Image (spheres, rainbow, N blue to C red):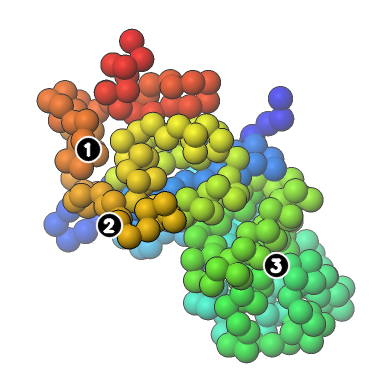
Amino acid sequence: MTAAAIVVTNLRTAIAGADETIRAVDGIDLSISPGQTFAIVGESGCGKSMTALSIMRLLPDAARIMDGSVSVAGTDLLAIPEAAMRNVRGRRVAMIFQEPGTSLNPVLTVGRQIEEVLARHIGLKGPAARARAIELLESVGLPDAATRIDDYSFQLSGGMKQRVMIAIALAGDPDVIVADEPTTALDVTIQAQVLDLLKDIQAKRGTAMLLITHDLGVVAAMAHRVAVMYAGEIVETAERADFFARPSHPYSRKLFEALPGTALRGTPLSVIPGQVPSLATVFVGCRFADRCDLVHDRCRKAAPEWTTISPGHTVRCFALAAGMK
């Protein structure tokens, strides 16, 4: 079997507030193979982006990784000093951010930003770095790359900026790409183009990808494996086909029920009652209990363990565990 490109074990991240501690990521486990896309899906506030930032060690000042490991090429990224981590970011693990307009440096040309990665991680400088930067911009489909390389980010459209972000991520030839809502800021047509580009790049390079999204359509188009995240923890994992054929956790089912469709035209959209609980809560029982149609007394007294629905398909739910017996 091919070794995993990245393995995350029991990842826990907390944010210290004035009066409370927010447990943004609370015991995440995942493994991604080379060439595989692993999607984490869920509502805003569930901890998806904090998972990505924890893996990259790009947390806000008030946040701390409390436990766990992130193993890439045999190295635990959480155990090395920041100086060593700077050599990992962009080389072993790269990130595509949600908002390229705020992630790109407005006072440097896009070419200069790519060349900085090439100089640090590949050792290319001068004309060789510029030539490689043009190749990267061409590979991500940026029109007239030889001219656009000297543009600043404000001179580019949203789709062009995202292509530049992808080129920067690819410049160090990373083993893993973390993509945090990479198409949220784009219109539907450009979104499809960027997703196709990412799939094509992944197929050619065999890159592992962690995809953070709230969009089940993006999951259907991109993912090989899916994890549903709720209130800081993963509540369901499955292969993509199995997940879409049989979403099992009550939260996963409600996500699908809330999707609009032509068959439902003229009828009110289904909504999930309530909201994601505060991640400052010290949870005792199931975190979805207050919004769940299947809730019973046991759900509020203890946290459910994993139940296997089918090979590779697991879920945290007492009701499903009882049904499997």
Q: Is residue 135 left or right of residue 222?
A: right
Q: Which mark is residue 217?
A: none
Hey, what amino acid is under mark 1? Cys
- Mark 2 and mark 1: span between their CA atoms? 20 Å
Residue 11 falls in image quadrant? top left
- Mark 3 and mark 2: span between their CA atoms? 42 Å
Foreground label between 1 and 3: 1
Q: Can residue 82 be spotted in the picture? A: no
Residue drawn where x is 79% and y is 82% of the image:
144
Q: Which mark is residue 167?
A: 3
- How far across and how far down the image is residue 317, in percent? 30, 27
Quadrant of the rendering where the C terminus is positioned: top left
Q: Secondary structure at mark 2?
A: loop
Residue 147 vertical placement versus 318 (above, below): below
Hey, what amino acid is under mark 3? Ala
Foreground label between 2 and 1: 2
Q: Residues within 10 Å of mark 2 (few under 14, many from 20)?
A: few
Q: Secondary structure at mark 3?
A: helix
- Mark 1 and mark 3: span between their CA atoms? 43 Å
Quadrant of the rendering where the N terminus is positioned: top right
Mark 3 or mark 1, which is nearer the start of the sequence?
Answer: 3
- How far across and how far down the image is residue 82, in percent? 52, 56
Mark 2 or mark 3, which is nearer the start of the sequence?
Answer: 3
- How far across and how far down the image is residue 294, in percent? 22, 30
Residue 271 vertical placement versus 118 (above, below): above
Residue drawn where x is 75% and y is 71% of the image:
141
Which residue is disc 1 drawn over? 292
Mark 1 or mark 2, which is nearer the start of the sequence?
Answer: 2
Hey, what amino acid is under mark 2? Pro
Residue drawn where x is 34% and y is 29% of the image:
316
